[in-house]
Image (tube, grey):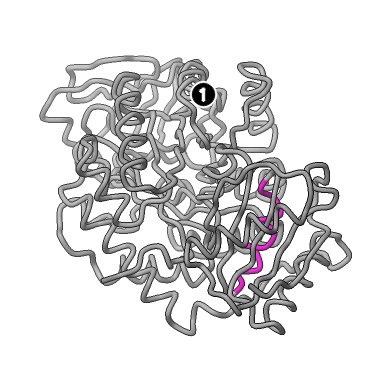
Amino acid sequence: MLNYNMINTKIVATLGPASKDLKTVRQLIKGGMDVARLNFSHGTYKDHRDLILILRKAAKLEKKTIAIMQDLQGPRIRVGIVAEEGIDLVRNKIVTLIFGAKESTSKDIIPIDLPVVPELEIGSSILIHDGIIDLKVEAVKGQDVKCRVLRGGIVFTHKGVNIPYTKINAPVITDKDRADLKFGMQQGIDWVAISFVGQATDVKKLRKLITRYDKTANIKIMSKIERPEAVNNIDKIINVSDGIMIARGDLGVEVSPQRVPIIQKDIIQRCMAVSKPVLVATQMLDSMIKSQVPTRAEVSDVANAVIDHTDAVMLSGETAFGLYPVESIQMMNKIIVETEMSPFDDRVDLLYPPKKDSHYRAVADTIFDLVRDSNAKAIVVLSRSGFSVQLVASQRPHTKIIALVADDKIRNQLNMVWGVQAYKIAVKKNLDELISQAISLVIKQKIVRKGQNVVFVSGQPVGKSQHANMVEVYKI
């Protein structure tokens, strides 16, 4: 039987109609779910509230910490309401897209829910249903866009629309997002994902909105990279974000598909260099929505993300509305376990090495050397904000990382970070009391045994220092 607590790569699972009951959610937790994603492109507030209540009950019964990530819809463009059988588009057919229209009964007109026509040019490409249908713009007149079908298919209600390399005159944070965020904060979310980020200012606006709703809120922002503009501004976006999601679904439509694997590897490396968690998402085990077994290509996709040292991998439709949600998460965990046991997971060759003159890097290098030289069985990090934990984890050490924090929210948020097991401990006045409490915990949890070495990382003075500045080896 697999020991799911031993893997380093975290699993984010999307909850939905296929995983809304207590029994299934408990099975997902047993299968290795670390973070539950709630997709606010779908469902009512009652649906999400009920899911959160079930999730917390399941986590309590399984005695496991589960973080909650709210995924905001953003300015997603969708087809309006069309006939139930859809609109059949064949190659070279002329069809008219009407922006701002909610519904159409014509076989030659496709309503688009975006009220403002983008800055289209003759020859621009408009893609529908994850890029399956490809239209070429031939004329623009007011709200009407005349197109020729280059690659056909059937257009159904509410299918997604992508317009690559075109400026969309719509705010990244919509009115719906604002209302959804307020609701999510009331429910106690740990992470919020912002969709269709283009530049750093988009993330800053979301952070200001969080503060406006609650000045004391501690919510991490996950920026979703799914547009060419975001790829071009990636370093600035990483700098102002708490984490990065490589959302390969829309990204693979907006840029050439063959570029996505290289973009994925590049972003993971950039995030590791600055100790920010990174998540690989979309279509990882997509065939398991309908099949009990994945394709070999999907297995390789998950394994390669693990070898790339991503912090987490994500299941979307597989667990939200697929036929085999539990089998999907079990399969993902098996792939992670097998890959992490291999020597290919051990190499960490950074394309973008961190600055060697930074205080943080000096501490990280010291920790790495002490773990190696003392044969330490665990790194115990006493942290206020969680950043010192992320710093240690970004080194991808070959030993357990135990985070000890005084705040429930930070403990939950660290569930997104590679290799980290986080525990809440009581606040102590001095370092000796903290270390004594930490030793008792790691022995109780059977993380280490007496006689083994542990590297302790903390800030001095206790409770005041913002950064790790004390590293010491202790023999249990």
Relative depth, front residue between 220 and 468: 468
| Left or right: 72, with 24 as reference point | right
Relative depth, front residue between 56 and 299: 56
| Left or right: 182, with 204 as reference point | left
Name the residue at 76% across, 56% down: 432
Query: Are there few (<14), some (14-19), or many (20+) residues within 10 Å of tag 1?
Result: some
Which quadrant: the C terminus?
bottom right
Q: Which residues are magenta?
A: 386-397
The x, y position of residue 32, in whole percent, is: 35, 56
Question: Element under label 1?
Answer: helix
Residue at the spot of label 1: 185
Name the residue at 45% across, 33% down: 70
Which quadrant: the N terminus?
bottom left
Name the residue at 23% across, 38% down: 22
Residue 422, above or below 395:
above
Membership of 370 in magenta stretch? no
The x, y position of residue 329, in whole percent, is: 29, 56
| Left or right: 342, with 283 as reference point | right
Membership of 387 in magenta stretch? yes
Residue 240 location, quadrant: top right
The x, y position of residue 30, in whole percent, is: 30, 54
